[in-house]
Image: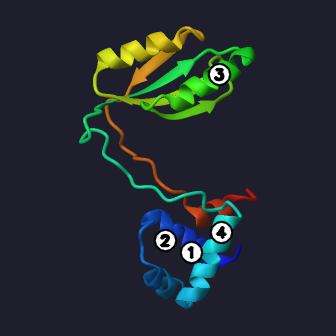
Amino acid sequence: MDNIDLKLLSLLQQNARMPLKQLAQQVFLSSPATAARLERLEREGIISGYRAEVNLKKLGFPVIAFINLELRPDQKPEFYPFICSHPNVLECSCVTGHFAMHIKVAFDSTENLDQFIGQLQKYGSTETQIVFSTPQEPRGVDIEALLTNKGE
């Protein structure tokens, strides 16, 4: 990866729908050369997808919560299909510490969140935090800063 690839990644994180012609102008390449770079970045798995950011509150899901779940290793084969198929689960990570899973969810009501937590508790105990506000929404990574600080 060179500086042009890094610039393309930064631009796409800001606006994944930026037209190819505009991307090419920003990195001072032709459109075909830019398209070839994007295809390579996708093929290599560096670009893993393009997503729209959706306002969950406006869709009717104002209750965002983080749930920590205790889970024994032997439960993972049963738990993973359950958690991956549940439409209210936005993210699930296997983490270190007392709890094994950190789950981000969105619900239309605290009652439905409570019902979901009840389903989770068949796997182990839970601890839940409901989000009041999000001063920093999810964002892309500052690639230049990461690479600059990589050796530190």
Compared with residue 131, is residue 14 higher up or lower down, i.e. above or below? below
Compared with residue 96, is residue 29 higher up or lower down, i.e. above or below? below
According to the image, label 2 marks what residue?
11
The quarter of the picture where residue 59 lies is top left
Q: Which mark is residue 86?
A: none
At a point 62% along the width and 19% down the height, the residue shown is 99
Label 2 packing within 10 angstroms: few (<14), some (14-19), many (20+): some
The secondary structure type at the circle numbered 4 is helix
Q: Nearer the viewer, mark 1 or mark 4?
A: 4
Circles 1, 2 touching at the beta carbon (< 8 Å): yes
Precedes in sequence: disc 3 or disc 2:
2
Precedes in sequence: disc 1 or disc 4:
1
Q: Looking at the picture, tell me which residue is in the foreground, 100 or 135.
A: 100
The quarter of the picture where residue 62 lies is top left
Q: Nearer the viewer, mark 4 or mark 2?
A: 4
Whole-angstrom CA distance, mark 1 to mark 3, is 36 Å
Whole-angstrom CA distance, mark 3 to mark 2, is 35 Å
Q: Position of residue 13 (x, y in %)?
A: 49, 63
Q: Which mark is residue 100?
A: 3
Q: Amino acid at mark 1?
A: Lys
* Badge count: 4
Precedes in sequence: disc 3 or disc 4:
4
At a point 48% along the width and 83% down the height, the residue shown is 26
According to the image, label 1 marks what residue?
7
Circles 1, 4 touching at the beta carbon (< 8 Å): no
Precedes in sequence: disc 1 or disc 3:
1
Whole-angstrom CA distance, mark 1 to mark 4, is 12 Å
